[in-house]
Amino acid sequence: MRETKEALEWIVKILRKNKIPFEVTGGFASRIYGSKRILADIDIEVPDKSIPEIQKLTERYIIYGPREYKDDNFDLLLMTLNYKGQKIDICGKDSERIYDKSKNKWINEKTNISKARMKKVKDLIVPVVPLKDLISYKKELGRNVDKEDVKVLAVKLTKFPYKIAGVFFFVFGILFLLNSKLNFTGAFIGSNNIPSSFNLILGIAFILVSFILFAFTGKLEDSLTAVEEMELKRGTPVIIDTNYLIEVCKNQDEYKNLMSFVKDRYNLGKPVIVPKSVFNEFKFLSGDEGEKTRIKTLKETLSKCATTLEDIRGEVWENSDVKRRSMRKAEELLHQTPKYFAYQFLSEINKGEHPTIEKFIGKSRGKMSNAFTEGKYEENIHNAVREYSRISAKSGANAKMNFMNNYNVSPADVDVLSGAIYLKEVPDILGGKPLNDIEVITKDSHLIDSLKMFNSANPSEGQIRVKERV
């Protein structure tokens, strides 16, 4: 038994995770647009240069190629996979030729993946060859199956006759205006009870509608197409922090919103980045069974739908000078936050020392950021000391250490912040996004304050947006 849905999800995840552009075409695309014939395989077109990479990622499922395939209809670079009984044809778009039966010659098949339309397919949203291009392609091939598809698809391509409707509204509008003066309908039916004002209002309304239809026909068609097919968009990269994930699982409504957000972005091919250190820190510590279940389910969803910069860049990320610079910058900013200064003050207390806030501020003044007042630093220290004293009086050493660690800078804090800075330095890996198209979702004041410092120091380069919820 073929598992078409699982096969589609599997190959789409591989292509998106590795940033390989693609579009669905052929018989599967025909079914997406309404053809009812039996599905043979899933046809996917990719750049020729991407096929060796896909070969490495899917090696155990390959049943043909990759190599040139030629028959009476096609001449192309082809690799066929078999995933749980469902065949998937991976075709190179750049060198593909088809035999045009209407012209009796081979022609180059020109495919522009950037023009693909986003369509919902088995709970996924995937790029599909535009309907008009698919019909042209099938007319050129001219096989019996293609002729059957064209009959069905041509009906889908037929557009609503806005201009004819405009003429209809205009003619009837004029008739209603004339009727408001001459009352020829009243004479025709033998009644004068139709108010002229009613005819006048209808006439004006119909004529206005006709002008709208004439003037905006193209825009109406475009907007309806956009709503129906959802134009391909790369989407803003979003980085999620541990603190936010833990807080979200304490609230059922926020948890549902995040689950929908992550799944929707995955289906649309928009990146949700969760660093490995965030994933490792995201675990159940205390709370009710409902919270424990939500954490478990969310971790499973993130494992499937989220990505990391390690996944996106591989060895390039691990050995990158930009990565190292980004991490140094992130650590520098995080160690200037008021929350981290509070941690340093608590550390001195924990060692048995008895510092005063005034003296501590005095000796630390040169390390503080100009983005915050001394009052902000003092306020954070006061709040931390008050809570630390309360915990010390009621709880043991473990509770005190856990409280202090909450004020310290964690590996996840560094990875989230350095990831955002890295994306600013190499935006091409996510479609050339400028700096102000990066979002960090966090409730941690370490990150919120660090990004405030970063943005104030780089005002001309745009801003990394900070949000406390999706």
Image (cartoon, rainbow, N blue to C red):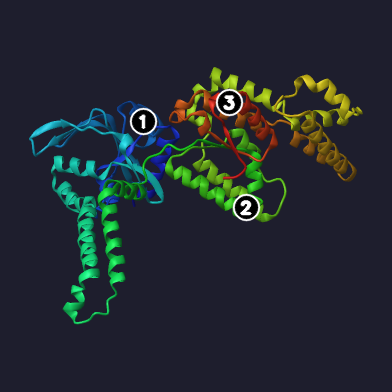
Image-quadrant location for residue 155:
bottom left
Q: Position of residue 463 (x, y in %)?
A: 56, 30
In the image, residue 31 above or below residue 362: below
Neighbourhood count class around disc 3 (C-alpha, 10 Å): few under 14, some 14–19, many 20 upward: few
Q: Which residue is mark 3?
A: 459
Q: Position of residue 430 (x, y in %)?
A: 46, 31
Q: Inspect the image, locate mark 3, and give the three-letter code of the amino acid beneath it.
A: Pro
Q: Is residue 170 visible?
A: yes
Neighbourhood count class around disc 2 (C-alpha, 10 Å): few under 14, some 14–19, many 20 upward: few
Question: Relative to 82, is 340 on the left or the right?
Answer: right
Image-quadrant location for residue 467:
top right
- The structure residue drawn at horizontal position 65% and vertical position 55%, both measured from the top left corner, is 290
- The structure residue drawn at horizontal position 34% and vertical position 48%, both measured from the top left corner, is 223
Q: Which residue is mark 2?
A: 293
Mark 3 touches mark 1? (CB < 8 Å): no
In depth, the one of 396 and 267 nearer the eye is 267
Q: Inspect the image, locate mark 1, and give the three-letter code of the amino acid beneath it.
A: Gln
Q: Which residue is mark 1?
A: 55
Of circles 3 and 2, the one toward us is 3
In the image, residue 246 above or below residue 195: above
